[in-house]
Image (cartoon, rainbow, N blue to C red):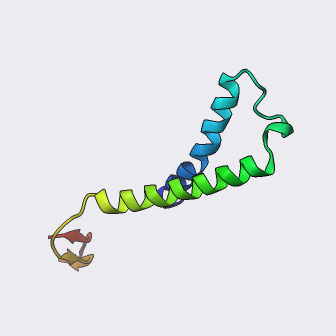
Amino acid sequence: MWRVILEPALLFGSPFAAYILYLWARQKYPFAVDHWTQSAVSTLVLAGLAVAVAGVLLIGVFAERHHGSYAPAHIENGHLVPGQIQ
């Protein structure tokens, strides 16, 4: 369940991390308020949304698919048989 929340959140945060690394490489303090103007933050938010949407779509397109029918969990001879793809 955490994967569903964590992957898009990390993808969304990647432009912010890149901006912090950029400021650090230019030897500026990345947590100073004057570096985080309204235009910089709005650009980072839009870039984060674009990266998150593209990443989720790419993960959905290229994810491994299992073919076959799903047999739900059931009880055989008094033992629980877990669900599986056949």
**Total label count?**
0
Decide: is 65 above or below 27. below
65 displayed left or right of 46:
left
Camera-nearest residue between 1 and 42: 42
Q: Residue at x 64, y 30 (%)?
A: 22
* Image quarter of residue 54: bottom left
Q: Residue at x 65, y 23 (%)?
A: 25
Decide: is 41 above or below 27. below
Q: Residue 44: x and y, percent?
A: 65, 49
Q: Residue at x 55, y 49 (%)?
A: 10
Q: Residue 80: x and y, percent?
A: 27, 72
Camera-nearest residue between 28 and 79: 28
Q: Residue 21: x and y, percent?
A: 63, 30
Q: Quadrant of the C terminus?
A: bottom left
* Image quarter of residue 42: bottom right
Q: Residue 51: x and y, percent?
A: 51, 53
68 displayed left or right of 52:
left
Decide: is 71 above or below 6. below
Farthest-out residue, top: 27
Farthest-out residue, right: 33
* Image quarter of residue 82: bottom left
Q: Residue at x 67, y 51 (%)?
A: 43
Camera-nearest residue between 43 and 86: 43
42 displayed left or right of 68:
right
